[in-house]
Amino acid sequence: MKLLNRPLTSGRGTRLAAAAGLAVLTAASSLAMAGPAAAAAPADAVIRAAHFSPTTPGVDVYLGSFSGASSKPWLGGVSYGAVSPYQRLTPGLYTVSMRPAGAPASTKPVLSWTLNAKSGQAYTVAGVGADASVRGVVIRDDLSTPPSGKGRVRVIQAASRAPVATVTATSGPVIARNAAFATTTGYATVDAGTWKVTARSDNASPTVSASTAVDVPAGAVTSVLLLDAKSAGITLRTVLDSSSAGTLPKGSVPAGAGGTAPITLAVSATTIERQLAGLAALILLGYGAVLLGGQRRRYARV
């Protein structure tokens, strides 16, 4: 038997090889173009809830799509002065509602308002005010990193016993001047360190005041809460909003997608690589089978 001195691929085999290579390149190009766009899904918003109404008893907080889906329980038994941790939320339009703690979901909400959660933004949703003036608000939070060696501080004024108050850091800046009850100030940038902060009512008789030590780490964002004390007067408490850039919550609010939230599909680079490898293997195996069959037929004819 004489072995034929021919190239491994015939003319037809060459065309198959070219077609296989073109298929792999085309698939690779398509997946490479689709991959980044799919992987770049919009970032979540982050949200937390707070209770800043001294005359309102504990509440359960609900969150639901604005599109008409029923609200789902989010937080239970939230009392005055409480601030929940941040949680992730799919961007979209939502309805926030508060019902008396322990009341059935069918109970009419004490408060109900709208949140338009945008990608990459942070929000505090809260009930504020007193008596008949209680309302729901959305507070925009800035969790971006302060300048090097600095921290940012703001005041959430939730003390009805100090209708207007000024908050000052001893030997430091005025953080809030003439801050009205049920309002939130902008952020003040201060040197990192521990500051003694004093809040004092303005134009009130008798004057009420409170002081506390506020730790401001470098790179941190802090909210100072001005609240009615339990028995009389006012008190100060701090909440660390963000300790550094990239500090993200792990849990998600069980509310589903918002009324305007797009449906996205994230595809990782690893997934794309595996798809390409599998596609290439299938094509090459098929091409190998064609070549092997052709060789066997040629050998059989010799």
Image (spheres, rainbow, N blue to C red):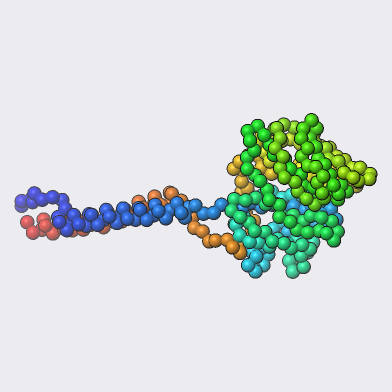
The residue sitting at 60% across, 57% down in the picture is: 91
Residue at 31 percent across and 53 percent down: it is 25
Q: Which corner quadrant holds the C terminus? A: bottom left
Snapshot quadrant of residue 294? bottom left
Image quadrant in which you'd find residue 253: bottom right
User: In this view of the protein, which residue sits in the foreground, 256 or 234?
Assistant: 234
Asked if residue 213 lies left or right of residue 45, the reply is right
Instruction: Return the residue nearer the eye: 94 or 166.
Output: 166
Q: Nearer the viewer, residue 272 or 127?
A: 127
Q: How many marks?
A: 0
| Residue 136 visible in this rendered orientation of the protein | yes
Q: Which residue shows up at 5% across the image and 51% down it?
A: 2
At which x and y percent is residue 185?
A: 75, 46
Q: Residue at x 13, y 59 (%)?
A: 297
**Residue that protrudes farthest toward the right in the picture:** 206
Name the spot of residue 276 as percent of width and height, x first.
36, 52
x then y, percent, for residue 65:
64, 64
> Eyeballing the image, is 35 above or below 100?
above
Across and down, in percent, residue 38 comes to: 47, 55
Q: Residue furthest left?
A: 2
Whether residue 62 is visible: no
Q: For residue 117, which quarter of the picture?
A: bottom right
